[in-house]
Image: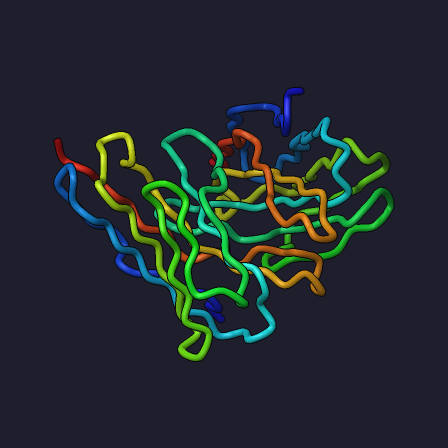
Amino acid sequence: QQQVKQSPQSLIVQKGGISIINCAYENTAFDYFPWYQQFPGKGPALLIAIRPDVSEKKEGRFTISFNKSAKQFSLHIMDSQPGDSATYFCAASNKAAGNKLTFGGGTRVLVKP
Amino acid sequence: NAGVTQTPKFRILKIGQSMTLQCAQDMNHNYMYWYRQDPGMGLKLIYYSVGAGITDKGEVPNGYNVSRSTTEDFPLRLELAAPSQTSVYFCASSAGTGLYEQYFGPGTRLTVT
């Protein structure tokens, strides 16, 4: 059972453009929604995260939008740069269940100069 | 402060062999996790631990075993390696209880032939 579905699997964006990645979850007990960034040959690293009591969180060029009623959340990368080329994973966890992360399938982003 | 370290970086096993993947963290984190990442896929939780002496199964535990005798170390044991265990293995840790961020190690790439 895939509890977190992520789309698209890959996307190509021009430098300066906006990258948008979407995730949908099923388990309403999830109470933490992070996004991880992974470069080739490296482990994932936390990029930005949101709790369900807010609808949006922005950190620099990265914004999470959260829609609790629709059980969806998305990552927007504004003014995309070639250095943003990486694989992005959404995830969800529940503190009461040991903070175990359930990951989406990942989105490979390529930013063309 | 080295964070999360994993050894070895690469390993090739023959079918039926056994090995232990090592993971250590120096952040005094109580929570530790083992994930596997198959090509083009998200990470799946194998086992996790909420403290020394306490471990529990994740989504895909079959064929693996763990132990947690100290706060710092969380080794993953593969018994009777099978080709289906060819993957990249990531260890992660978090402080838990109110601090959700998981810090990932650099990964171990395992091939079973």
Residue at 63% x, 44% y: name it.
B34
Relative height, residue A27 to residue B75 (above, below):
below
Q: Residue A68 versus residue A55: which sits nearer the camera?
A: A55
In the rendered image, the residue lying farthest to the bottom is A69
Q: Is residue A51 left or right of residue B27?
A: left
Residue at 63% x, 26% y: name it.
B5
Q: Is residue A43 left or right of residue B76?
A: left
Which quarter of the figure has residue B6?
Answer: top right
Residue at 40% x, 78% y: name it.
A70
Q: How many marks?
A: 0
- Rendered image coloring scheme: rainbow
Q: Is residue B7 left or right of residue A68?
A: right
Q: Is residue B105 left or right of residue B32?
A: left
Which quarter of the figure has residue A99?
Answer: bottom right
Please state the horizontal and vertical placement of residue B10, each as a whole percent of the image.
Answer: 51, 25
Please state the horizontal and vertical placement of residue A107, each as a whole percent of the image.
Answer: 31, 50
Which quarter of the figure is the C terminus of chain A placed in? top left
Q: Residue A20 versus residue B84: which sits nearer the camera?
A: A20
Please state the horizontal and vertical placement of residue A111, each as a whole percent of the image.
Answer: 19, 38
Relative height, residue B62 to residue A70 (above, below):
above
Please state the horizontal and vertical placement of residue B47, each as a whole percent of the image.
Answer: 67, 51
